[in-house]
Image: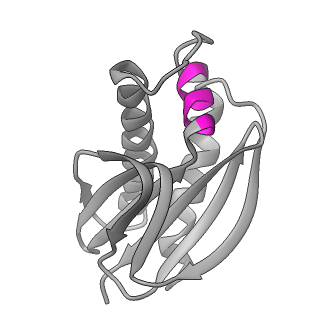
Amino acid sequence: MDIKYINPFIESFTTVMPQLGFNSIKKGNLSVKGKELISSGVIIVVGIVGAIKGNIVYVLDKEHAKKIASTMMMGMPVEELDEMAKSALSELTNMLTANAATCFSTSGIPIDISTPTLLHGSNVTVEMSSNKVLCVQLLANDIPVEINIAFEN
């Protein structure tokens, strides 16, 4: 996968997260996964269509998801992943992916994104649109967020 398809997501994360109250942004691990992702916690799927097609899947463990939702809601305690917390997390992925779409557009690659679909539980399986999935781990205030990127060939 060409790096020009990855950088917009990293740039988006480093732009959006500080606006939401996360002052420490770091790059974590980079890995390659297969077509089938099996994760536990909160999984949010966003589809990509246009000049490139594919899926973006954001993965957080449940406790970190609650911390992110709390920060987004101005520090309001989040004890459970209720509807408000889930809505905040879905909106976060919408902002991150839309910002990445803007980055793609400015480099001449027009794309559109779908509405985020939030899943949660243990051992949730998501089948990606490509056999090769690039996983970028980014940290916001030391909270790991996994961004799985799959574009069709």
Q: Is residue 99 left or right of residue 71?
A: left
Residue bounds of the magenta highlight: 63-70
- Residue 122, position as x, y percentages in the image: 45, 54
Q: Is residue 114 left or right of residue 95?
A: left
Instruction: Give the dominant element type of the magenta stretch: helix, strand or loop.
Output: helix
Q: Residue furthest front?
A: 122
Q: Quadrant of residue 89?
A: top left
Q: Residue at 57% across / 9% down in the picture? A: 76
65 w.r.t. 6: above or below:
above
Q: Residue at 45% across / 68% down in the picture? A: 38
59 w.r.t. 51: above or below:
above
Please state which of residues 22 and 109 is positioned toward the viewer in this rendering. 22
143 w.r.t. 82: above or below:
below
Asked whether residue 58 is drawn in magenta, I would say: no
Q: Residue at 57% across / 20% down in the picture? A: 70
- Residue 127, position as x, y percentages in the image: 31, 74
Please state which of residues 90 and 99 is positioned toward the viewer in this rendering. 90
Quarter of the picture holding the C terminus:
bottom left
Asked whether residue 69 is drawn in magenta, I would say: yes
Q: Quadrant of residue 29?
A: bottom right
- Residue 41, position as x, y percentages in the image: 50, 48
- Residue 53, position as x, y percentages in the image: 26, 73
